[in-house]
Amino acid sequence: MADPILKVSNLCTYFHTKAGVVKSVDDVSFEVAPGEILGVVGESGSGKSVTGFSIMGLVDPPGRVDGGSIVFDGRDLVGLDDGQMRRLRGKRIAMIFQDPMMTLNPVLRIDTQMIEALTAHITISNEEARQRCRDALGMVGIPSPDERLKSYPHQFSGGMRQRVAIAIALLHNPELIIADEPTTALDVTIQAQILYEIQRLVSEHNTAMLWITHDLSVIAGLAQRVAVMYAGKVVETGTVAEVIDRPLHPYTNGLIGSVPSRNRRGEPLAQIPGMTPSPLNLPQGCAFRTRCPKADEACAVQPGITAPLPNRFIRCFHPVEAQEVIGEAVSA
Amino acid sequence: MTVFIIRRTLQAVIVLLVMSAIVFLGVFAIGDPVAILISPDATQADIDAAIRNLGLDKPIWEQYLVFLGNALQGNLGDSFVYNEPAIRLILQRMPATLELAVVAVLLSIFVGIPLGMWAGLRPSGVAGKSIMVGSIFGFSLPNFWQGIMLILLFAVILGWLPAFGRGDTAEFLGIRSSLWTLDGWAHIILPAINLALFNTSLVIRLTRASVREVIGLDYVKFARAKGLSRRRVVGVHVMKNIMIPLVTVIGLELASLIAFAVVTETVFAWPGMGKLIIDSIFVLDRPVIVAYMMIIVLMFIAINLIVDILYSVFDPRVRLSDMKR
Ligand SMILES: Nc1ncnc2c1ncn2[C@@H]1O[C@H](COP(=O)(O)OP(=O)(O)OP(=O)(O)O)[C@@H](O)[C@H]1O
Ligand code: SF4
Ligand SMILES: [Mg+2]
């Protein structure tokens, strides 16, 4: 595979709140290559969005990047000044947000919001800018783009708004797109259409992509590799096929068991017991300790990264054995 | 749009009717103007003549109907005191009050919004905190006291500006105003500041709160994610959204400044409507009081209408035809 365009190493993003330090992203490392889609999964509050915002340089006080590096195309983004970061944002690294109803400014027309994204980075005539906006809208499947450009966001449905946001993200053909659960708020058919179109665009333009979601089944058909996050840490990485087929981390195993599967039709879905721990009050050692079926005294120490199988990395002292796999064990 | 305006006009007529009846009855209930107007040593015959002249011998409902009939022809009655049409008395003094209120509102906009934005964008900075503390003073210190302090400092101690009265007027574009002369500005600056202080504080606090709210929303973050400059994000994306609550408050402010400039006009001896209405209330000069109230109500209605129209300019989700009120 090509050299990674993005290499995140030991990233720490903490929120220094009055109540204490929230370690939203803690010692996170991963990389993405051009043309590759890396899925980032994890339940709500595991630090997925904060990871994305850290790369964009959009973490606001009381949060800040407290350690690690984010190397994009050979340059560390941590410590870049505002101006340098601004020139990258939207141009070479784009982000699509979680909630399509909230991403577009309600009081500005679509054309204003698209053209400003162009003129922020390049000098371009108004006519040319409009043409590019029309093309971008057409590309994401918005009919009669000419008319749509003159509309306001409230005249669009959620799916349409997300398409507009995607079109804006694609305007400059960025080398890296961070997609933060872009389809979660949409209904299933629209989700499928958008997934299909994004996949096509990524492979056409050889874009690297970070696909953030809490839904493992979306990743399964979309990404090549996956990073599983729990309480601010990446607990397992590997190729999607391998991780789903043979999860090594107890949390991943639980996650897969909670996804409906054809092989286990009629059986109750397995659930991960317990609740996500409060980010202010994580258990000592492995943060999954309070919910993990395999936890023992050893887990009171933070597990380091190990590779129990070739190219499979986890943070766990007691990897899941083959016979313990919930997902596929039944059919095997 | 047409339906909207017709409905608004009908509402205005009803409000005016109710209002005039209330004021009419209210003044009637408070006391007898004749007792105040006539000199104590007048004969009974003089008093009776005065009562008949002023139309006060008829029952109150008949007086009201006569008033309504005249009002429909644009005549709101003559002042008991000046023997001049009440409307003319008020209109003579209106420009002075209007120019004072307009300067005060402009002050609160052009001082309040920038300061509020500064405090909203840098909430933990020293400047931001000082602005908020300052606004509490503007809020809570009594208006007349602020006025006296302004006079003391700038007129008495420093001697920079005149202490009271309205400056020379001049005519420009068919409008006679003291704003067209330097002397006029020297006179208006202190009372305008005095009148603006409370509202400026209000605008500062509202602007700050709106900025804090909007700045954390996804669409502002998305605007930044597009690589827009800070100037564009704040000046367009944030600004256009905070204007929506601000327009309402500033509109109502203008109306209330016109209606309640009384204290400032008294402290600075400003020859406006506020002074006239206070004097008229003391002598129960009913035609002037009623006419004044009706003009103020009309002004509130007009400003509300303008605010609603501005609303639809700033917020595309609002269309006048959908407005229920
Ligand atoms: N402004 C903030 N102040 C304090 N803590 C924050 C702030 N923003 C995020 N966090 C914390 O960071 C943690 C991770 O949040 P993040 O939004 O990245 O979760 P997520 O994985 O994207 O979840 P979701 O699936 O709900 O979007 C949360 O525990 C949250 O409490
Ligand atoms: S380290 Fe221990 S507690 Fe943590 S996931 Fe592994 S077995 Fe469970
Ligand atoms: Mg999120």
Image (spheres, coloured by chain):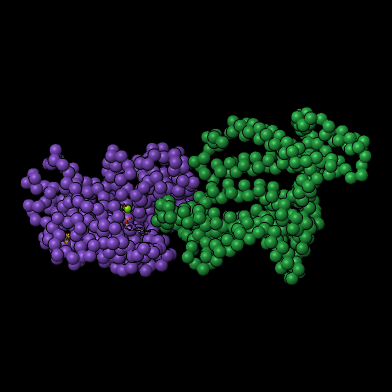
| Image coordinates for residue B85, horizontal then vertical, percent | 82, 39
| Image coordinates for residue B255, horizontal then vertical, percent | 66, 47
What's the colour of chain B in the image?
green
| Image coordinates for residue B72, horizontal then vertical, percent | 75, 31
- Chain drawn purple, letter? A
Name the residue located 58 percent from the left edge and 64 percent from the top edge: B134
Name the residue located 16 percent from the left edge and 42 percent from the top edge: A268
Classify residue A187 by image quadrant: top left
| Image coordinates for residue B153, horizontal then vertical, percent | 71, 68
Closest to the observer: A228 or B126? Answer: B126
Name the residue located 26 percent from the left edge and 61 percent from the top edge: A282
Residue A36 makes an appearance in the image:
no
Closest to the observer: A281 or B59? Answer: B59
- Which quadrant does ligand 2 occupy? bottom left
Residue B74, placed above or below residue B134:
above
| Mark count | 0
Q: Quadrant of the C terminus of chain B?
A: top right
Q: Is residue B90 left or right of residue A89?
A: right
